[in-house]
Structures are given as structure tokens and as C-alpha cells.
Image (tube, rainbow, N blue to C red):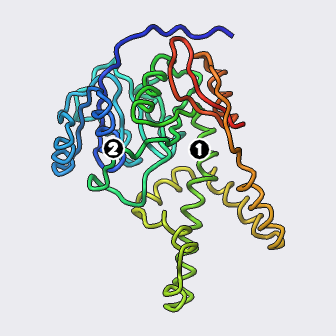
Amino acid sequence: MTAFPVPTMPAPPVGVVGLGQLGGSLAAALVAAGRDVTGWDVDPDARAAAAARGVRIGRELDGVVVLAVPLPAMGHALADLAVPPDATVTDLGSVKVPVLDQLRVTYGGRYVGGHPMCGTERSGHAATDPGLFTGARWAVCLEPDTELPRWLRVAEVALAAGAEVVPATAAEHDDAVAAVSHVPHLLAAALAAAAGEAGPLALALAAGSFRDGTRVIGSDPAFVSAMVEGNAGPTAAALARVQAQLARPWPELVAAGHAVRAGAPAGRREVRVPLERAALLALGRAGGAVTRRLAAFVEGHLPD
């Protein structure tokens, strides 16, 4: 297949809408990387905190505009802001198909879905960490109508923040994160609720395994509910697979789970992939990631 030719151009400015944990951390990381960043948040305290970290505050956004707002706010996040019609729009939302369906009506191929797999149970601008994305996987979505130069610009923002880029379609993303993120939030909630029913003694004896198993349900309940309900179909399917596993004989279940964890690839193989949709998606589907752009190619790695 023919590689998509992409000329070398100066990195465009970045606008970040929403300066909570993810948006604030991204803006700060990009400032540290030397990118031109403008941020906006309806909360004046969030704006002040970002300004103190070197982020320009303003309503005029250009280049790559990142929506770091709750899922229900995606559709109107830019309503009162000045964004030119040629700007690329992306987001950091934990669900992609509903956001794609909503935003493609307005932005078409200018919208490129994104989701960094990082964050903590904390929220708000006080949880900002410029190193949050370092080494994290960041899904950047490639649909049939995605404009590849815009996909590359979004990928370059993720790389500049320290992340590794995983190409995927929105539907593939939602199926995958249902299994590794959304169901774990539900399981953490169930584990915490069941332990609460067990009484004060059980909670007093809770140690590392309980703490690790319930950490994510310390997140804002509204955020978790919006995430799992926004991805209800894939999450229900992934939860059914977990319930089927729990029905297995316990020794068999324990052995199967241990084998998956112990069998994780220990190494990785460096690869070079052309800037072509099928090749990029094949990299993501194989468990690989992009780590660097090189002219009309990207460099990355596959599990080995």
C-alpha cells in the first residue's frame, strides 16, 4: 500500500478546553515540551492554576483543540469560544463511539477521537501532574473519514506529552476499554459494597489486595456512571465474560487468570510503519504503539 505523504510542518498551537486533572496535566506537559498552548475553563480557579504553570489563558483557540470536559459536555464545549473552521478537534473522553457520533455531525473528518489511558481517582485542577502521560498508552482513533494529516497532528500532541499512541477505531477502542477499564470500575464498586456489608471488622482488616482492587471507585461517581452508561453495550458484554469466568471451578479460574498475567510479553520489537490507515490500525490491533514520527513513517513497537 502507498504511504500517505505528509510534509514536515511547524507544530500547530494547541488549545485545551477543560483544565481539570487531564486537561490541566496535558496543558502543563505541552508547555514543558515547548508547545504553544492556550487553555480555557469555566472555573476561574482552574484557569488561575493553569496560568501559574505557564499556560496562556484565553477564549481564542487554534490548531489542535482538545476537549478535556465531561462526556455530557462534549457537544457544547466550544459554544462560547472562538475556534477557526480549519482547526482539528480531538478529545480525552473515556468513550469514543457516542462522542464520534455527536461531534462528526459538526466537525466531520476534522474530529479525531482520543483517549489517554492514565489518570487517577483524584479529579480537578488540584490533581494536575505534568508527568501524568509519561509512558501511558493514548488511543487515537482512525475512522474511514478521518483526515490522516489531522490524525498525525493529534498523535504528535500525545507524543509531545510523553505518551505512546495506539491507533484504533472508535468501536475497537470501546470494546477494549470496556474489558480493561469500565468493568474494573464496576468490579471495584461491587467489591467495596460487598466489603461494607461484611461489617467493620472486614474493613478494619482490609490491606493491599482490597486497596488495589477498590482504588478506582474512589473516582467521582458521576464520572464513573457517565463512563459505563456511555459505553453500556460493550461494558455489558465484557461484564458477562467476567461473570462466566466466575462460574468456573475456582482452581481453574485462578490458574487461567494467573497464566494471562504471567504470560504477558516481556519484550518488544521495534518497527517502522507507513502513514497509511490499514498499516496503522494493524499495529494497534497487534498490541503495538507509535513512539515517534519519522517523515512519511512512524516508528513504534510490537510485543515480542
What is the number of callouts on the image? 2
- Residue 68 placement: quadrant: top left
Residue mark closest to the camera, 2 vs 1 = 2
Sequence-earlier tag: 2 or 1: 2
Would residue 49 appear left or right of 283 to someone viewing this image? left
The relative height of residue 13 versus residue 233 in the rendered view (above or below) is above
Name the residue carrying label 1: 174
| Mark seen at residue 117 | none
Quadrant occupied by the C terminus: top right
The relative height of residue 152 versus residue 266 in the rendered view (above or below) is above
Point out residue 171 in the picture as x, y percentages from the top left corner.
61, 38
Residue 109 appears in view = no
Q: Residue at x 36, y 46 (%)?
A: 22
Point out residue 257 in the picture as x, y percentages from the top left corner.
74, 61
Sort mark 2 into few (<14), some (14-19) or many (20+) by Cα contacts within 10 Å: many
Name the one closer to the observer, 73 or 301.
301
Q: Residue at x 47, y 29 (%)?
A: 112
- Residue 57 placement: quadrant: top left
User: Is disc 2 placed on a helix, strand or loop?
Assistant: loop
Point out residue 30 in the picture as x, y percentages from the top left corner.
32, 33
The relative height of residue 178 versus residue 18 in the rendered view (above or below) is below
Name the one closer to the observer, 44 or 289.
289
Would residue 99 appear left or right of 17 to someone viewing this image? right
Question: In the rendered structure, which amino acid carries the disc numbered 2?
Answer: Pro
Q: Residue at x 68, y 40 (%)?
A: 267
Question: In the rendered structure, which amino acid carries the disc numbered 1?
Answer: Asp
Find out whether the residues at labels 2 and 1 contact each other: C-beta distance under 8 Å.
Answer: no
Point out residue 118 in the picture as x, y percentages from the top left corner.
47, 48
Name the residue carrying label 2: 130
User: Is disc 1 placed on a helix, strand or loop?
Assistant: helix
